[in-house]
Image (cartoon, helix red, strand yellow):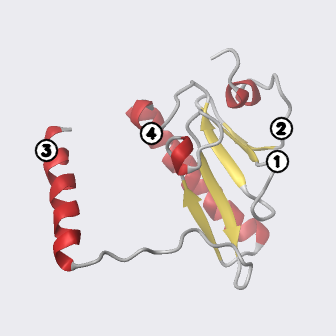
Amino acid sequence: MSDCLFCKIATKEIPSTMVYEDEDVYAFLDIHPVQPGHTLIVPKVHSEWLLDTDPEILKKLVVVGQRVARAVLSGLGVEGCNFTQNNGAVAGQAIPHFHFHVIPRKAGDGFKVWHGMPYGSAEEAEEVARKIRDACHSA
């Protein structure tokens, strides 16, 4: 996609701080990191989100994500990391190009991923689960 920011970064039309690269995947430091070392992992071929990403490329992205996460842990000496992915603007996806975030974590860093909202009842949880189960059979 000609005007996609992450496509331009992956093709080096726009500079970035590269962490990892192969023929299908490009990983680079986020310019607005949640924590130092916050890395983005993108496919070189444009897709907007999880649902339109080629399954073979998706597998490669996950394997590279695992490699980058291990490198973040050992290279930065942190205690853990978040491996996240957002789909659509409503879910927090700021750039419409599929990507994973690897966010280094250490105790007391203050970063919160989410605040839980419990179901009102077991019946409500079961109804939500039923809707998802039914949709899984037709997906």
Please tell me which of labels 3 and 1 falls first in the chain: 1
x and y, in percent, of residue 108 in the image:
72, 85
Q: Nearer the viewer, residue 28 or 125?
A: 125
Q: Position of residue 40 (x, y in %)?
A: 67, 47
User: Would residue 27 appear left or right of 14 to someone viewing this image?
Assistant: left
The residue at the far bottom in this view is: 108
Q: Residue 41, can we see it?
A: yes
Question: Residue 14, labelled with which disc?
Answer: none
Q: Identify whether 108 is placed above or below 26.
A: below
Residue that carries the numbered disc 2 in the rendered image: 16
Q: Is residue 103 left or right of residue 118?
A: right
Q: Position of residue 101 (x, y in %)?
A: 62, 53
Task: Provide the residue designation for mark 3.
Answer: 137
Residue drawn 62% across the image and 61% down it: 69
Q: Quadrant of the C terminus?
A: top left
For mark 1, what is the residue? 31
Numbered tag placed on residue 50 in the rendering: 4
Q: Secondary structure at mark 4?
A: helix
> Is label 1 in contact with label 2 (beta carbons under 8 Å)?
yes
Name the spot of residue 133 as percent of width and height, x first: 16, 54
Q: Earlier in the sequence, mark 4 or mark 2?
A: 2
Earlier sequence position, callout 4 versus callout 3: 4
Real-space CA distance between mark 4 and mark 1, rounded to the nearest whole angstrom: 22 Å
Task: State yes or no: discs 3 and 2 in contact (Cβ < 8 Å).
Answer: no
Q: Secondary structure at mark 3?
A: helix
